[in-house]
Structure formats: C-alpha cells, structure tokens
Amino acid sequence: MTTDIPVLIAGAGPTGLALAHDLARRGVGFRICDKAPAYFDGSRGKGLQPRSLEVLDDFGMADEILAGGRFHIPFRAYEGARVIGDRDIHAGRVPTPDVPYASPLLIPQWRVEQILRGRMERAGHQVERDTELVAIGQDATGVTATLRHVGQEENVRADYLVGCDGGKSFVRHALGVGFEGETWSEERMFVGDVEVPGLDRDHWHSWQNAEHGWLALCPLPGTNSFQLQAQIGPDDPGVPSLERFQEIVDQRAPGTGLQIAAVSWLSLYRVNIRMVDRYRVGRVFLAGDAAHVHSPAGGQGMNTGIQDAYNLGWKLGLVLNGAPGSLLDTYEEERLPVAAWMLGVTTKLHRQIMPKSGATMQRGPETYQLGISYRGGTLARDDRPEPGAVAAGDRAPDAPCQTSDSKPVRLFDLFRGPHFTLFHLGSGVPDENLGALVHTHRIVDSEGHVRRAYGVGDDVQVLVRPDGYIGTITKNSVGPYLKEVGAYTG
C-alpha cells in the first residue's frame, strides 16, 4: 500500500513531537512513527531552558508545562553525611519585562513528551508506535519510505521526511551523512530513576568529591523519584542495577543511610560529542539527536532538538503552501552553527564536573539559549544604519504594552500562534492587507518597555517570524520580505 502525505516524521521524542504539534497547528498533514512499542518513561533529559519555555508558550502549553516542573532547586553539597553548603546556580535570575522565563525549569523529559503528545492527540493525530522505518528512497518529487509494523510493510510516499530518530538515527545512516566527533569511552556514568525514601526533595544532592567519582541525586518534580547520576571508572564493568546503584550510594555517601527502594529506569551513559555536517539531503532533514549528540552537562540536548523542530516547522508549512523551496535551505544555514556552538558549551561544562577536582559547575547565561541569533543570515534584514542591541535575526523579546484600543497585552500574546507578527509604535498603522499569515498591530508603549527591549522609534516596523525571531526591522514596507519567504502574494 502506498499513502501520500506531506510530511513523514521518524521518531516521537521531544523533537518529533514538537514538529508534529507545529505542523498540526498549521494544518499540514503528517504521520509520525516510532519503532518503540511503548512510550519512553525515563527522565533522560530533565530541564527546559528559558528559550524552550518560550517555544512551548507559543504552542499554548506554558501553564501545563510549568505545572509539571519546578524552578530554582539548589544544589546541596556533601562530604559523606555532612552538608557542606547549598547553592542555587541560577540565583538572582528573575523574570523581567523582556524575559518572562528567567531560569531553567526542572521537569522530566517523559513529562514534556506526554504534554506534547497529549496536545497532538487532541488535535486528532496519533503516534504510530512499534512502527519502524526500514528503507528510504527519494527523487525530485518526493520521498518513498518503507515502514514495518508487526511484520507487515507499507510503502509511504511523502513530500518530505524528517529524521528525529535519535543518536543512532536510521535516517542519518541511510542518507550516508557523516557523524563527526569523538567518543570518550573512559568517561562513563550510570543514570537512572530511583526512589529514595526519606531524602528531601527540596535539594539536588551532590557528592562531588567522593573518592571513587561523583554522585548526584536530583528530585524529579511531580514524581516520587530522583534521577541518579554517578561517575564510574574505566575498569567498572558498567552493568547498571539496583544493587550496583545501592553499592555506589553506600560507598560515596557513607553515614547517610540512604536506601534505594526502587528503580524504574537505568542506563549506562558514554560521552559522545558528534554532529552532522549537513542537516538536509534533498527532501530529507535531520533534527535533534539525529543531528547532534553531546555531554548532558548544561541541559542542552532536549532543548536544541525542540528548537530545531520549531525552526523547520514553519518553513515546511510555507513551502508546502507554495513558497520557494529555497526557504528550506535556511534550516541548515541557521541551525547547524547552533549545534556546533552547543557542542562547545556542553564540552566545556562537562570538563568542569567530570574530574575529581571538586570544581563547581558554572553555568553562564549562554545555556539559557536566549542569545541564539541568526543575524547576517538570509532571513535577517535590518535597514537601520545602526541596528542597536537588538537586530534582525535576534530573538524577539517580550514586553508589556497596550493595543491601539488601550487593552493591556504582552508581545508574546500577540506572537502566539503560527503566524508572522508585524507591529509599529507610531501613530499610523503598519502595512495592512498582507494576508492571513501576517497579524498586524499598532502598539501603545506607555511604559516604554517595547522601546527599551527593541531599541526602535515610532517610525519603524518590526516583523517577527513564526518562530519568534525578528525577520526584519524597517521603515519601509515589509511586503517584499514576505513575498520572498512565500508568506504574501499580493
């Protein structure tokens, strides 16, 4: 059987689900499959960075996400049973008018997937579980993929295929795309979700200077579990089990009496630092761990994957609706440098926490991913002689303001949804009649938050892309820009 669909998504982790949700709200047809017979229920990733929270806010699910997580859980350092001290590595980070989410949210990955999947299902779509992608072919007009489910094979014809199928990606291998980098085979750790009765859940417990390697127990909000992370030596057999976890706790946290009552997920982690040199081969794209893997230090993996999907979704939607195919080239142009940057950041952080030097991990604001920018790229146009602190290609800041009829609103409220947003501070009105894909607003900025955040005057128009980045800042019409990206045909 052959089925024709616009987009086939391989992999239903956070990246694939974010892409599926974004396509669904654009009315783009898709199928999403995953070879696993059941949904993954381990924590694996456990934090959403501020920029990812802004993405999920745009998806309309911020309340649900925030209810499932927690901000500002301080590290509590120990030597044996003795508490050395507490430290909140995000201390002082509080919401501001332009940054409503100021620090990472601790939340298990499975909960993020559950929320994304629930929204997608309510929109009438389902993940096809126990369905494996086993062959790919493509030509100038589409992709032919073979799916295997319960021993039966189905040929699917799609306009585009997106591989969100993890670090061992079948899609990447089938394309012959290199995955350059290195494996640090001697730097390994156990990771698992465990129950530890009696251990307080208001701290991230850490034995950084234990003789045989560090140990950490992080409470997972909304559960009875902690994520256990434990460094192991090169001579350790590397077989995770409840008994081995308990042995590590007894050895590295002596005198505490901590007992592991249950283990719901356990794993051996080896450090891989790798990325592709291409995000696109014809009509096939790579996203998330299929395109980049790295140390978990800094909490960047799940976040970078979600933002890969967020960058690609609106571009696929426009091209499938008649926009120039060249728009899809900007996905690799914009996201590949981000992956390279992210590997550098996480490697630096990893070097701080893996040695037995007792070094305290320092996380700078770059890990929040608010400073990621596409300045100077194909889709960034700023015709001001001196752009200022915020320019085309940058993240579009939030700001409280008023609509032209004096109703209080935040810019993020106006941005929310699959459209472009055009706003103007002057007494006139911005470009009008730009079609359904562009929402236009005259903003009243009585407290000056918009002017301070954007550095713009009354005679300037700001066009914000569907993924929350500034497309253009101009005194002229935005029509030509919108025509180039296929969002306006007037």
Image (cartoon, rainbow, N blue to C red):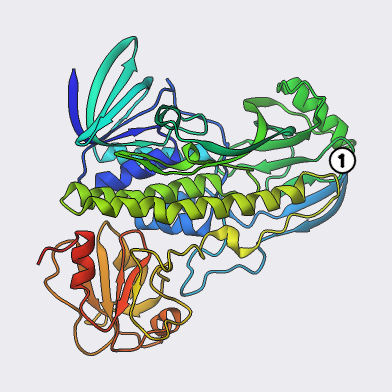
Q: Residue at x 52, y 50 (%)?
A: 339
Question: On the rendered structure, is 165 left or right of 128?
Answer: right
**Which one is in front, 248 or 7?**
7
Please identify the residue farthest to the top as the structure is shown: 151
- Is residue 423 visible in the rendered image? The answer is yes
Instruction: Residue 340 in the image: state x and y as whole percent.
Output: 55, 51
Instruction: Residue 260 in the image: state x and y as whole percent.
Output: 73, 28
Q: Secondary structure at mark 1?
A: loop
Instruction: Residue 429 in the image: state x and y as whole percent.
Output: 19, 83
Q: What crowding class fits label 1: few (fewer than 14 Cα within 10 Å), some (14-19), or many (20 or more)?
A: some
Question: On the image, which quarter does residue 3 sit in?
Answer: top left
**Which one is in front, 489 or 200?**
489
Residue bearing the label numbered 1? 210
Circle 1: residue type: Ala
Q: Looking at the rendering, in which quadrant would you find the C terminus?
A: bottom left
Instruction: Residue 362 in the image: state x and y as whole percent.
Output: 72, 59
Q: In the displayed structure, would residue 376 be above or below residue 161?
A: below
Question: On the rendered structure, is 117 left or right of 75?
Answer: left
Q: In the displayed structure, would residue 426 be above or below residue 263?
A: below
Q: In the displayed structure, would residue 266 be above or below residue 59?
A: above
